[in-house]
Image (tube, helix red, strand yellow):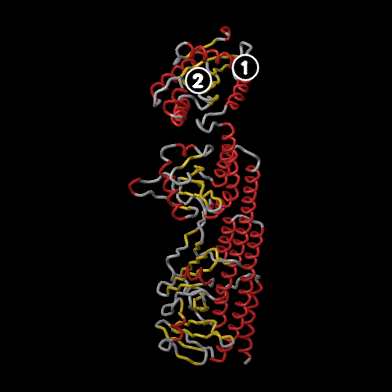
Amino acid sequence: MENKSQFILNLKSIFFDILQKGESLFRYEDLSNHLGKLTGADQVIIYLKDEWKQAYIAEPNIAVSGLPSSFSFEAINDSEHLFNVTNNIKICRLDNGQAVIILLVQEDKLLGYLVLYFKKDQPNALPASLLNDLGNICSDIISRINTLDHFLTEKDRYKLLFHMTEKFQNSRKMDLLLQEMLITLKKVYPGFTFFLLLSHDYKTDLALPIKDLDYTEEKNGAMQAYATGRIQVESRLKNKHSTLYAPLMGRQGIYGVLQVNAAEAVIFPEKELTFISLLARTTGGAIENVQLYQQSQQLISDLQLINETSHRLNSDLRLTETIKFMTEQIKDSFHAEEVGFILLSQEGEAFNVLNGSTSFFFTQEVTAYIELIKQKMIEEEEAIFIGDLLFPSKRGNTLFKSVMAVPMDQSGELHGFVLVMNCTPYHFTFESFKLLQSLIHHSTLAFKNSLLREELENLVITDHLTKLYSRNYLDDQVEISMNKDKEGVLLLIDIDNFKAINDEYGHQVGDDILRQVADIITNHIRSSDIGSRWGGEELAIYLPNVTADTGTLIARRLNTKVNSLTKPQVSISCGVSYWNDEIEDSYSALFKRADEGLYKAKNSGKNKVVFKKKTDV
């Protein structure tokens, strides 16, 4: 008994000395060496329970023939062929000696095995009662060490988790959140690999292990985790490899799945599942907060865009200025390459591209796009959102792949549509599409008002029959030109024998002749020139910044064109006058000279052009 008490006292002293070193992790190699000296064993091996591998692993590594480096749980339970059982002590006879196996049990839970190896020529002299005491004391201290080790490990882990959460609070960028989560995981599980399976397309400049979430594989662990919101584990017992899928879940939804690959692991222990689940939920909540913040910022930006646009559109902009402003707004806000505003005829067959649209909409190539989108819009009666546009095969490939088209309608009547395009497939998001719809919806009334206002203005300044400008408009523009330009030419035109045409063919033909001559004028002068109906069969043209010679040449060319293009054939007489800023002049004097020229042309045989200089008057 005295020897036994001394043995136990020495054993406890060993544990105390090892723990006194103050190391955070217990060194089982030190324990094995001391136990060897105390028991006289040639080698002491401790097999400890490894939850990951579902086995008992030798500490330290052994080199004893006939003893394995690890026992699986199943092998231990089916080990009658290997050990003789005597309570908690088992004897294993080896070719080169024997091994005494002591079960380390605490509260009916098997912690592991203490193996004392003795060479063949050195028989074991330790009694069974002493071996039982040795096992009990070792079980107690190993249980306490496990508890302490678990506490220290959990403390370090949750300290890392707290640190990660602190960083989440200060970050508004998704890629930084994901990077911080992966850093934490690698610190806790340095031998594992990780992937992020995200539910939305995500672009980042950081080298993050991101993969697409495969929605087609409904039965795989990732989709099960995403669909159910619960951790899924796939274990491959044959090659001892396990994969865990943890949903990145917030309060409002699931934003992806964390994939954890554990090599040399049969299962994920319960405490690891709890920790990874908490980490994934924390990350999911942070992702949700960032997305909500980004959505709120985007919503503010969208409302500012709509508000600014509505304000500008209600500031009496000209139609072209309105379209140009809207085109720039859409290009900047949606990163569009081409933006076009298309007006449709009442029948919906013809279309007109409004000035202010981007340059591509004034090329021949745009017709195919407009016709295709117009047809789709008429058939589907709603806005169009296409990520990868394809023409019918006969038209070949399309230059622009991403397309958004929003109708401009009021009271159910389609007046036209806005067409927004980009060359990159799937360039526009669905959120962008909804914003464009809202923007155009708020803008359509302003477009319509601008269009009606300009139509009304055109009615005021345009002659209904000839579609030329009115005399008042001509008067105003000549006055303005004489104040700002350097020179100009005024042409007064009279259709010869017009009364005779009315008498012979009727007033309808007379009106048609007026329209024919007006069309010839419109088609043979510049957009900056002003053709107008002076009154009756008299017409007038003002040519700003044109010399006297050029003005006279234009008048003669019009005279020739009228002779050759009208049916029934008519001729015109024309008086031409000129001004420049080097000689003092006035509009009334300019008109009087042109009128004098016209009078002379008609009284000298008609079908003539007469130029009157200022000195001629």
Say which of 433 and 354 sits in front.
Answer: 354
Query: On the picture, is 22 further left or further right than 497?
Result: right
Q: Is residue 158 visible?
A: yes
Q: Quadrant of the N terminus?
A: bottom right
Residue 493: mark in rendering: 2
Q: Looking at numbered disc 2 in the image, what kind of residue is underneath it?
A: Ile
Query: On the picture, is 391 further left or further right than 254?
Result: left
**Residue 37 picture quarter:** bottom right
Query: On the picture, is 506 further left or further right than 547?
Result: left
Residue drawn at (64%, 51%), measured in percent from left and top? Answer: 303
Say which of 35 and 376 sits in front.
Answer: 376
> Residue 264's spot in the image, x, y percent?
46, 70
Residue drawn at (56%, 18%), measured in percent from left and top? Answer: 488
User: Could you say whether the residue bearing mark 1 is in a helix, strand or loop?
Assistant: helix
Q: Looking at numbered disc 1 in the image, what kind of residue is underneath it?
A: Ser
> Residue 124's spot in the image, x, y percent?
49, 87
Vertical relation: 431 (above or below) 124: above
> Residue 340's spot in the image, x, y percent?
50, 42
Residue 576: mark in rendering: none
Location of mark 1 (residue):
588
User: Could you say whether the residue bearing mark 2 is in a helix, strand or loop?
Assistant: strand
Vertical relation: 110 (above or below) 247: below
Q: Residues within 10 Å of mark 2 (few under 14, many from 20)?
A: many
